[in-house]
């Protein structure tokens, strides 16, 4: 039982990171109608800024985090305003290629600004909570993972509340439904997309900081796996909704850890390296039967 609880507790941080990155990618996809392949490196840039703020300026991680989120936000807004807005005749595929090119640009700029040394990082809080079970076994959850859970849950909850009840949320939903009609109804779609990109950048920096605070070594590509998980979550959950991809984002890292738990309990530890392959295979089967995603809706178009 302790092993099972430890598996669940170990899934908390990956679930938080994947959910934040997925929320960021979904916001951009719904308003700019493209998948942002540069989300991971922009998030990594934000983590580098956080590291520099507390290592060189002597700020705490809590004070450094907003600075990193602001830096990633400015980069993301700059991509929308300076590149996408001026590329009005670029189709969706062209926009994806642009974001792929941004990967090399941002990764190349990072060592020029921050140097080649490994950036310093630390946890939000130190220590563990332990649970002693009736059989004498002990389950452990880190305090840092609980803090990360509170941060991620609070931020995502606020965004969903704003999407549902605020004027900005109505504008986002209208733009996501039909950008041209939204513009005809008086909605400034440029501001909507700029805010969405800015939020996506900030969410990415928060996710990268959470990842680094759990002990992951920072690099320009250290968020790539979570970006892949986020794309899978979007397809699996269904990009036609905002909540579907986020729910799927919670399922993917949890499923990965549960598969590792099952193969270890079954006495096949050599199969743990195949855990994500198994998760991808299951996701592929689900998408085959529900191409619109688990929570997606079929869209009927009138001819």
Image (cartoon, helix red, strand yellow):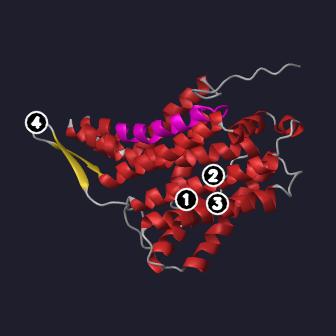
Q: Which residue is mark 2?
A: 200
Q: Mark 4 or mark 2: which comes first in sequence?
A: 4
Confirm whether the magenta stretch covers residue 249: yes
Element type at marker 2? helix
Q: CA distance from mark 3 to mark 2?
A: 7 Å
Q: CA distance from mark 4 to mark 1?
A: 41 Å
Mark 2: give few (<14), some (14-19) or many (20+) Cα within 10 Å: many
Q: Which residue is mark 4?
A: 135
Tally of numbered discs: 4
Q: Mark 1 or mark 2: which comes first in sequence?
A: 2
Query: On the image, which quarter does residue 134 sit in?
Result: top left
Instruction: Tell me whether circle 3 and circle 1 mark residues in contact (CB < 8 Å).
Output: yes
Q: Mark 3 or mark 2: which comes first in sequence?
A: 3
Question: Any mark on residue 73, and which?
Answer: 3
* Relative to 269, residue 214 above or below: below
Q: CA distance from mark 1 to mark 2?
A: 9 Å
Q: Position of residue 34 (x, y in %)?
A: 73, 46
Magenta part of the chain: 237-259
Confirm whether the magenta stretch covers residue 75: no
Q: Which residue is mark 1?
A: 205
Q: Main secondary structure of the magenta part?
A: helix
């Amino acid at each position: 039982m302790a092993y099972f609880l430890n598996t669940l507790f170990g899934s908390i941080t990956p679930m938080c990171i994947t959910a934040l990155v997925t929320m960021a990618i979904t916001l951009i996809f719904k308003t700019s109608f493209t998948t942002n392949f540069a989300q991971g490196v922009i998030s990594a840039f934000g983590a580098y800024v956080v590291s520099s703020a507390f290592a060189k300026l002597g700020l705490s991680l809590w004070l450094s985090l907003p600075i990193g989120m602001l830096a990633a936000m400015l980069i993301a807004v700059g991509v929308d305003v300076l590149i996408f807005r001026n590329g009005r005749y670029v189709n969706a595929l062209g926009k994806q290629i642009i974001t792929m090119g941004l990967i090399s640009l941002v990764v190349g700029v990072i060592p020029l600004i921050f140097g080649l040394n490994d950036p310093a990082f630390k946890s939000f809080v130190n220590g563990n909570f332990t649970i002693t079970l009736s059989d004498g076994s002990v389950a452990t959850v880190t305090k840092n993972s609980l803090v990360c859970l509170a941060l991620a849950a609070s931020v995502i909850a606020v965004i969903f509340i704003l999407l549902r009840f605020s004027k900005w949320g109505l504008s986002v939903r209208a733009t996501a439904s039909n950008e041209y009609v939204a513009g005809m109804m008086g909605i400034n779609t440029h501001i909507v997309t700029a805010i969405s990109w800015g939020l996506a950048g900030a969410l990415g920096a928060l996710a990268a900081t959470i990842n680094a605070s759990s002990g992951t070594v920072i690099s320009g590509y250290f968020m790539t796996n979570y970006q892949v998980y986020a794309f899978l979550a979007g397809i699996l959950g269904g990009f036609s909704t905002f909540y579907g991809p986020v729910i799927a984002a919670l399922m993917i890292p949890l499923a990965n850890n549960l598969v590792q738990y099952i193969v270890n309990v079954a006495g096949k530890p050599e199969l743990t390296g195949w855990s994500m392959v198994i998760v991808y295979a299951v996701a592929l089967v689900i998408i085959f039967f529900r191409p619109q995603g688990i929570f997606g809706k079929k869209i009927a178009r009138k001819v």
